[in-house]
Image (tube, grey):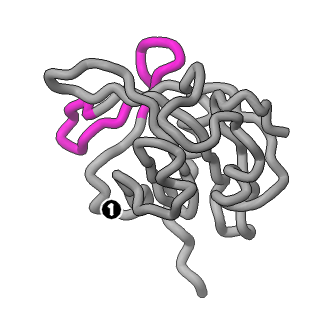
Amino acid sequence: ENRGDGRGGAFLPAQGPEQPPRLAGFLEKRSRGAFHHWSTKWVVIADREFRYWNDKRRYDLGQEPKTMLRLAEANCPFRFAAGSEGGIFLQVHVSGQIEARWRVSPKPSGGGTSDGSDAAVAAAGGGGVSAASGSDEWLQVILLNCIPREPRS
């Protein structure tokens, strides 16, 4: 079940045998460039897409995500990999340049509910919630969402 403290994320059940697992929760992102600070994002991994909003309130209001990556498409410009630092995973451009570092947020921020409630998780895909505690779980769900659908025969 969800920890209820807003940290990490919550596994969401797959929506059928061909659907990869889903995950939603707060992560912190540190982009490359002049500003090297960590900023909290509300992230949803579902339906072979990586989507995030600057705050959960925007997600709750149904606004478009700030970024959406179609993970299983061949032309997706990014890949994800484990970082050399514990608790970090990397967003890497296909050119090989590290675009961003991601980690599980120690606490939520940026609007919306901050309690990690099941309602927020349910909005991302349904009940049956169980805890996801760290970057390894996030990376595993991301990588499973990178696998294209099997062609129907």
Point out the stretch of residues depicted in magenta: 81-99
Up-down: is 52 above or below 123? above
Residue under pointer 1: 74
Q: Is residue 153 left or right of residue 41?
A: right
Q: What residue appears at the point 37 percent right and 64 percent down from the top-left corner?
A: 73
Up-down: is 140 above or below 39? below
Question: Is 112 colored magenta in this rendering?
Answer: no
Question: Is 93 colored magenta in this rendering?
Answer: yes
The front one of 52 and 16 is 52
Residue 113 location in percent, x, y? 63, 41
Residue 21 location in percent, x, y? 67, 53
Q: Residue furthest left?
A: 34
Which type of secondary structure does the marked residue at label 1 adopt? loop
Hey, what amino acid is under mark 1? Ala
Q: Quadrant of the N terminus?
A: top right
Up-down: is 69 above or below 143? below
Residue 95 location in percent, x, y? 18, 41
Total marks shown come to: 1
Residue 9, quarter of the rendered image: top right
Q: Is residue 116 left or right of residue 87?
A: right
Q: Quadrant of the C terminus?
A: bottom right
Residue 116 location in percent, x, y? 70, 38
Q: What residue appears at the point 20 percent right and 32 percent down from the top-left corner?
A: 97
The front one of 120 and 2 is 120
Residue 124, quarter of the rendered image: bottom right
